Amino acid sequence: MAISRMKAAATALLRARQASQTVTQHLAFSTEATEAAAAALRLGFKKAQKDEDDAVKVDVEEKPESPTDVSAVSPPAVEKKLVPPAMSSTQPLWLTQDHPVTDLSGFAPKIVVVGVGGAGGNAVNNMIARGLQGVEFLVCNTDAQHLRTTLTENRVQMAPELTGGLGCGANPEVGREAAETAIDEILERVQGANMMFVTAGMGGGTGTGAAPVIAQAALEAGILTVAVVTKPFRFEGNNRAKLAAQGLAELKDSVDTMLVIPNQNLFNMSNERTSLMDAFRMADNVLLDGVKNISDLMVMPGLINLDFADVQSVMQNMGNAMMGSGEADGENRCV
Protein backbone atom coordinates (compact mmCIF):
# COMPACT_ATOMS: atom_id res chain seq x y z
CA MET A 1 0.00 0.00 0.00
CA ALA A 2 2.75 2.34 0.87
CA ILE A 3 4.64 1.28 -2.17
CA SER A 4 1.62 2.00 -4.35
CA ARG A 5 1.30 5.48 -2.90
CA MET A 6 4.96 6.14 -3.45
CA LYS A 7 4.63 5.11 -7.12
CA ALA A 8 1.59 7.32 -7.51
CA ALA A 9 3.44 10.23 -5.95
CA ALA A 10 6.46 9.64 -8.20
CA THR A 11 4.23 9.48 -11.25
CA ALA A 12 2.52 12.75 -10.25
CA LEU A 13 5.88 14.37 -9.67
CA LEU A 14 7.10 13.21 -13.07
CA ARG A 15 3.97 14.57 -14.79
CA ALA A 16 4.31 17.86 -12.93
CA ARG A 17 7.93 18.16 -14.10
CA GLN A 18 6.92 17.39 -17.70
CA ALA A 19 4.16 19.98 -17.50
CA SER A 20 6.62 22.48 -16.08
CA GLN A 21 9.04 21.81 -18.95
CA THR A 22 6.20 22.21 -21.47
CA VAL A 23 5.20 25.53 -19.94
CA THR A 24 8.82 26.63 -19.94
CA GLN A 25 9.18 25.67 -23.61
CA HIS A 26 5.97 27.57 -24.44
CA LEU A 27 7.21 30.59 -22.53
CA ALA A 28 10.57 30.40 -24.28
CA PHE A 29 8.84 30.13 -27.64
CA SER A 30 6.59 33.10 -26.78
CA THR A 31 9.58 35.15 -25.74
CA GLU A 32 11.42 34.31 -28.96
CA ALA A 33 8.34 35.14 -31.01
CA THR A 34 7.93 38.44 -29.22
CA GLU A 35 11.59 39.31 -29.77
CA ALA A 36 11.35 38.31 -33.43
CA ALA A 37 8.27 40.46 -33.91
CA ALA A 38 9.94 43.38 -32.20
CA ALA A 39 13.01 42.93 -34.39
CA ALA A 40 10.81 42.84 -37.47
CA LEU A 41 9.09 46.02 -36.41
CA ARG A 42 12.41 47.75 -35.81
CA LEU A 43 13.68 46.59 -39.20
CA GLY A 44 10.54 47.80 -40.93
CA PHE A 45 10.73 51.19 -39.20
CA LYS A 46 14.40 51.60 -40.17
CA LYS A 47 13.60 50.69 -43.79
CA ALA A 48 10.69 53.11 -43.91
CA GLN A 49 12.84 55.86 -42.38
CA LYS A 50 15.58 55.15 -44.92
CA ASP A 51 13.10 55.31 -47.82
CA GLU A 52 11.77 58.62 -46.56
CA ASP A 53 15.28 60.04 -46.16
CA ASP A 54 16.16 58.92 -49.70
CA ALA A 55 13.02 60.58 -51.07
CA VAL A 56 13.83 63.84 -49.32
CA LYS A 57 17.39 63.67 -50.58
CA VAL A 58 16.26 63.17 -54.18
CA ASP A 59 13.79 66.08 -53.88
CA VAL A 60 16.52 68.33 -52.56
CA GLU A 61 18.88 67.35 -55.37
CA GLU A 62 16.25 68.14 -58.00
CA LYS A 63 15.73 71.69 -56.70
CA PRO A 64 18.19 74.18 -58.30
CA GLU A 65 20.43 76.16 -56.09
CA SER A 66 19.59 79.80 -55.66
CA PRO A 67 21.26 81.58 -58.59
CA THR A 68 23.25 84.72 -58.12
CA ASP A 69 21.37 86.30 -61.04
CA VAL A 70 18.02 87.23 -59.59
CA SER A 71 16.62 87.67 -63.10
CA ALA A 72 16.85 83.86 -63.61
CA VAL A 73 14.29 83.20 -60.92
CA SER A 74 10.71 84.11 -61.69
CA PRO A 75 9.24 86.15 -58.85
CA PRO A 76 6.08 84.86 -57.30
CA ALA A 77 2.89 86.10 -58.86
CA VAL A 78 1.57 89.11 -57.03
CA GLU A 79 -2.01 90.13 -57.34
CA LYS A 80 -2.16 93.66 -58.74
CA LYS A 81 -4.52 96.04 -57.10
CA LEU A 82 -5.61 99.24 -58.78
CA VAL A 83 -5.05 102.09 -56.39
CA PRO A 84 -6.60 105.38 -57.52
CA PRO A 85 -4.25 108.39 -57.41
CA ALA A 86 -4.68 111.02 -54.81
CA MET A 87 -7.23 113.65 -55.62
CA SER A 88 -5.80 116.96 -56.77
CA SER A 89 -7.10 120.13 -55.26
CA THR A 90 -6.62 122.00 -58.54
CA GLN A 91 -7.46 119.45 -61.26
CA PRO A 92 -10.21 116.87 -61.68
CA LEU A 93 -9.11 113.25 -61.37
CA TRP A 94 -9.73 112.48 -65.03
CA LEU A 95 -7.27 115.19 -66.09
CA THR A 96 -4.43 113.50 -64.20
CA GLN A 97 -4.91 109.96 -65.52
CA ASP A 98 -3.92 108.17 -68.72
CA HIS A 99 -6.84 105.95 -69.65
CA PRO A 100 -6.17 102.71 -71.59
CA VAL A 101 -8.24 103.32 -74.68
CA THR A 102 -7.89 102.54 -78.36
CA ASP A 103 -5.23 104.63 -80.12
CA LEU A 104 -7.07 107.74 -81.29
CA SER A 105 -4.04 109.70 -82.49
CA GLY A 106 -5.17 109.27 -86.10
CA PHE A 107 -8.31 111.27 -85.34
CA ALA A 108 -6.53 114.34 -83.91
CA PRO A 109 -6.72 117.48 -86.05
CA LYS A 110 -3.60 118.22 -88.06
CA ILE A 111 -2.53 121.78 -87.31
CA VAL A 112 0.35 123.36 -89.23
CA VAL A 113 2.10 126.62 -88.39
CA VAL A 114 3.67 128.21 -91.47
CA GLY A 115 6.26 130.89 -90.79
CA VAL A 116 6.72 133.19 -93.79
CA GLY A 117 9.76 135.42 -94.16
CA GLY A 118 12.29 136.40 -91.52
CA ALA A 119 9.82 137.41 -88.81
CA GLY A 120 7.74 134.28 -89.43
CA GLY A 121 10.85 132.09 -89.17
CA ASN A 122 11.84 133.75 -85.90
CA ALA A 123 8.33 133.20 -84.54
CA VAL A 124 8.48 129.49 -85.44
CA ASN A 125 11.87 129.16 -83.77
CA ASN A 126 10.44 130.68 -80.61
CA MET A 127 7.44 128.34 -80.69
CA ILE A 128 9.68 125.30 -81.04
CA ALA A 129 12.04 126.49 -78.32
CA ARG A 130 9.11 127.14 -75.97
CA GLY A 131 7.71 123.65 -76.58
CA LEU A 132 4.45 124.38 -78.40
CA GLN A 133 2.64 121.02 -78.61
CA GLY A 134 0.15 119.46 -80.98
CA VAL A 135 1.24 121.33 -84.13
CA GLU A 136 3.61 120.86 -87.05
CA PHE A 137 5.90 123.54 -88.42
CA LEU A 138 6.89 124.77 -91.86
CA VAL A 139 9.09 127.75 -92.72
CA CYS A 140 9.06 129.44 -96.13
CA ASN A 141 11.61 132.09 -97.04
CA THR A 142 13.55 133.58 -99.91
CA ASP A 143 16.62 134.24 -97.75
CA ALA A 144 18.70 131.05 -97.73
CA GLN A 145 20.97 132.26 -94.94
CA HIS A 146 18.10 132.95 -92.57
CA LEU A 147 16.37 129.72 -93.61
CA ARG A 148 19.36 127.71 -92.37
CA THR A 149 18.85 129.10 -88.84
CA THR A 150 15.37 127.63 -88.44
CA LEU A 151 14.88 124.88 -85.87
CA THR A 152 12.70 122.74 -88.12
CA GLU A 153 13.86 120.64 -91.06
CA ASN A 154 10.54 121.24 -92.79
CA ARG A 155 11.38 124.33 -94.81
CA VAL A 156 10.95 125.63 -98.35
CA GLN A 157 13.40 127.82 -100.20
CA MET A 158 11.11 129.86 -102.42
CA ALA A 159 12.25 130.66 -105.97
CA PRO A 160 16.04 130.61 -105.52
CA GLU A 161 16.40 131.16 -109.27
CA LEU A 162 14.43 134.41 -108.89
CA THR A 163 16.13 135.87 -105.81
CA GLY A 164 19.44 134.00 -105.83
CA GLY A 165 18.67 132.98 -102.24
CA LEU A 166 19.32 136.55 -101.09
CA GLY A 167 15.81 137.62 -100.12
CA CYS A 168 13.34 140.05 -101.64
CA GLY A 169 14.97 143.34 -100.72
CA ALA A 170 11.80 144.60 -98.99
CA ASN A 171 9.90 144.26 -102.27
CA PRO A 172 6.52 142.52 -101.73
CA GLU A 173 6.08 141.96 -105.46
CA VAL A 174 9.15 139.72 -105.52
CA GLY A 175 7.84 137.89 -102.46
CA ARG A 176 4.48 137.33 -104.14
CA GLU A 177 6.11 135.95 -107.29
CA ALA A 178 8.40 133.70 -105.26
CA ALA A 179 5.42 132.23 -103.38
CA GLU A 180 3.50 131.61 -106.60
CA THR A 181 6.52 129.74 -107.98
CA ALA A 182 6.81 127.49 -104.89
CA ILE A 183 3.12 127.11 -104.05
CA ASP A 184 2.83 123.50 -105.29
CA GLU A 185 5.66 122.39 -102.99
CA ILE A 186 4.16 124.31 -100.07
CA LEU A 187 0.73 122.73 -100.55
CA GLU A 188 2.35 119.31 -100.70
CA ARG A 189 4.02 119.97 -97.33
CA VAL A 190 0.70 120.90 -95.68
CA GLN A 191 -1.38 118.18 -97.34
CA GLY A 192 -3.97 116.70 -94.99
CA ALA A 193 -3.96 119.70 -92.64
CA ASN A 194 -7.23 120.66 -91.00
CA MET A 195 -6.02 124.06 -89.83
CA MET A 196 -3.13 126.29 -90.81
CA PHE A 197 -1.67 129.29 -89.03
CA VAL A 198 0.19 131.75 -91.22
CA THR A 199 2.55 133.85 -89.13
CA ALA A 200 4.58 136.69 -90.58
CA GLY A 201 5.76 140.21 -90.00
CA MET A 202 4.05 142.76 -92.22
CA GLY A 203 6.15 145.51 -93.80
CA GLY A 204 8.95 143.46 -95.32
CA GLY A 205 9.24 141.81 -98.73
CA THR A 206 8.73 138.07 -98.22
CA GLY A 207 6.20 138.14 -95.39
CA THR A 208 4.09 140.93 -96.91
CA GLY A 209 4.10 139.53 -100.45
CA ALA A 210 4.16 135.75 -99.91
CA ALA A 211 1.83 135.34 -96.91
CA PRO A 212 -1.39 136.26 -98.81
CA VAL A 213 -0.50 133.87 -101.66
CA ILE A 214 0.14 130.94 -99.31
CA ALA A 215 -2.96 131.68 -97.25
CA GLN A 216 -5.19 131.93 -100.32
CA ALA A 217 -3.94 128.59 -101.67
CA ALA A 218 -4.62 126.90 -98.33
CA LEU A 219 -8.06 128.45 -98.11
CA GLU A 220 -8.94 127.16 -101.58
CA ALA A 221 -7.71 123.71 -100.53
CA GLY A 222 -10.35 123.63 -97.79
CA ILE A 223 -7.98 124.28 -94.88
CA LEU A 224 -9.18 126.48 -92.03
CA THR A 225 -6.69 129.35 -92.37
CA VAL A 226 -5.80 131.79 -89.60
CA ALA A 227 -3.26 134.57 -89.95
CA VAL A 228 -1.35 135.78 -86.89
CA VAL A 229 0.78 138.70 -88.02
CA THR A 230 2.46 141.79 -86.64
CA LYS A 231 2.51 145.43 -87.66
CA PRO A 232 5.92 147.11 -87.49
CA PHE A 233 7.20 149.29 -84.68
CA ARG A 234 6.94 153.00 -85.26
CA PHE A 235 10.69 153.40 -85.29
CA GLU A 236 10.88 151.09 -88.34
CA GLY A 237 9.72 153.96 -90.52
CA ASN A 238 6.76 155.09 -92.58
CA ASN A 239 7.65 153.02 -95.62
CA ARG A 240 7.36 149.73 -93.73
CA ALA A 241 4.12 150.92 -92.14
CA LYS A 242 2.70 151.65 -95.59
CA LEU A 243 3.75 148.28 -96.98
CA ALA A 244 2.29 146.59 -93.92
CA ALA A 245 -1.09 148.28 -94.44
CA GLN A 246 -1.21 147.12 -98.06
CA GLY A 247 -0.24 143.58 -97.09
CA LEU A 248 -2.84 143.39 -94.33
CA ALA A 249 -5.60 144.51 -96.71
CA GLU A 250 -4.67 141.74 -99.15
CA LEU A 251 -4.22 139.13 -96.43
CA LYS A 252 -7.63 139.81 -94.91
CA ASP A 253 -9.34 138.52 -98.05
CA SER A 254 -7.19 135.38 -98.12
CA VAL A 255 -7.88 133.92 -94.66
CA ASP A 256 -10.79 132.87 -92.48
CA THR A 257 -9.59 134.79 -89.44
CA MET A 258 -6.86 137.39 -89.01
CA LEU A 259 -5.20 138.41 -85.75
CA VAL A 260 -3.12 141.57 -86.06
CA ILE A 261 -0.64 142.43 -83.32
CA PRO A 262 0.66 146.03 -83.39
CA ASN A 263 4.22 145.84 -82.15
CA GLN A 264 4.04 149.43 -81.01
CA ASN A 265 1.55 148.45 -78.31
CA LEU A 266 4.16 146.16 -76.78
CA PHE A 267 5.94 149.23 -75.48
CA ASN A 268 3.11 149.52 -72.98
CA MET A 269 4.61 146.46 -71.33
CA SER A 270 8.19 147.72 -71.52
CA ASN A 271 10.30 150.28 -69.71
CA GLU A 272 13.30 152.49 -70.39
CA ARG A 273 15.62 149.50 -69.99
CA THR A 274 13.95 147.46 -72.74
CA SER A 275 16.42 146.90 -75.57
CA LEU A 276 15.69 146.49 -79.29
CA MET A 277 16.24 142.74 -79.03
CA ASP A 278 13.88 142.59 -76.06
CA ALA A 279 11.22 144.38 -78.09
CA PHE A 280 11.39 141.88 -80.96
CA ARG A 281 11.49 139.01 -78.47
CA MET A 282 8.28 140.34 -76.97
CA ALA A 283 6.74 140.36 -80.45
CA ASP A 284 7.72 136.70 -80.94
CA ASN A 285 6.15 135.81 -77.60
CA VAL A 286 2.90 137.52 -78.55
CA LEU A 287 2.82 135.55 -81.82
CA LEU A 288 3.38 132.40 -79.76
CA ASP A 289 0.47 133.29 -77.47
CA GLY A 290 -1.77 133.96 -80.46
CA VAL A 291 -1.16 130.48 -81.91
CA LYS A 292 -1.00 128.64 -78.58
CA ASN A 293 -4.21 130.09 -77.17
CA ILE A 294 -6.13 128.76 -80.17
CA SER A 295 -4.37 125.42 -80.74
CA ASP A 296 -4.50 124.47 -77.05
CA LEU A 297 -8.29 124.65 -77.19
CA MET A 298 -8.20 121.58 -79.44
CA VAL A 299 -5.15 119.60 -78.36
CA MET A 300 -4.98 120.11 -74.60
CA PRO A 301 -7.58 118.75 -72.12
CA GLY A 302 -9.53 121.23 -70.03
CA LEU A 303 -12.63 121.62 -67.93
CA ILE A 304 -14.49 122.79 -71.03
CA ASN A 305 -13.19 120.98 -74.11
CA LEU A 306 -13.52 122.32 -77.64
CA ASP A 307 -12.96 120.13 -80.67
CA PHE A 308 -11.88 121.19 -84.14
CA ALA A 309 -15.48 121.42 -85.34
CA ASP A 310 -16.26 123.92 -82.56
CA VAL A 311 -13.27 126.08 -83.47
CA GLN A 312 -14.05 125.84 -87.18
CA SER A 313 -17.65 126.95 -86.73
CA VAL A 314 -16.46 130.05 -84.86
CA MET A 315 -13.40 131.02 -86.91
CA GLN A 316 -14.45 130.15 -90.44
CA ASN A 317 -15.09 133.32 -92.49
CA MET A 318 -14.75 135.35 -89.30
CA GLY A 319 -12.57 138.18 -90.60
CA ASN A 320 -10.69 140.35 -88.12
CA ALA A 321 -10.39 139.03 -84.59
CA MET A 322 -9.02 140.28 -81.30
CA MET A 323 -7.16 138.36 -78.65
CA GLY A 324 -6.57 139.16 -75.03
CA SER A 325 -4.59 137.46 -72.28
CA GLY A 326 -3.51 138.46 -68.82
CA GLU A 327 -1.53 137.37 -65.80
CA ALA A 328 -1.90 138.37 -62.18
CA ASP A 329 -0.68 137.43 -58.71
CA GLY A 330 -1.53 138.42 -55.19
CA GLU A 331 -4.71 138.21 -53.15
CA ASN A 332 -6.96 139.89 -55.73
CA ARG A 333 -5.59 138.04 -58.76
CA CYS A 334 -9.02 136.61 -59.66
CA VAL A 335 -10.88 139.92 -59.34
Image (cartoon, rainbow, N blue to C red):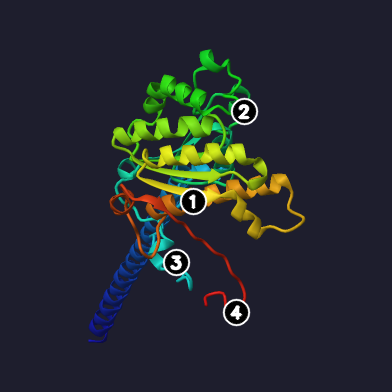
Which amino acid type is shown beneath numbered disc 2?
Answer: His
Q: Which mark is residue 290?
A: 1
**Residue that extends furthest to the top in the rendered view of this protein:** 161
Task: Report which quarter residue 303 is drawn in.
Answer: bottom left
Which amino acid type is shown beneath numbered disc 4?
Answer: Glu
Picture coordinates of residue 114 (x, y %)? 46, 36
At 52% from the left and 15% from the top, the residue drawn is 162
Measure the C-alpha gap from mark 4 to mark 1: 28 Å
Measure the C-alpha gap from mark 2 to mark 4: 46 Å
Residue position marked by numbered label 4 in the rendering: 331
Q: Are marks 3 and 1 in contact (CB under 8 Å)?
A: no
At 49% from the left and 22% from the top, the residue drawn is 158
Residue position marked by numbered label 2 in the rendering: 146
Mark 4 falls on what kind of element?
Answer: loop
If you read the primary sequence from the N terminus, does the residue marked by circle 3 or circle 1 appear first? Answer: 3
Measure the C-alpha gap from mark 3 to mark 4: 30 Å
Give the crowd class for mark 2: few <14, some 14-19, many >=20 residues within 10 Å.
some
Give the crowd class for mark 3: few <14, some 14-19, many >=20 residues within 10 Å.
few
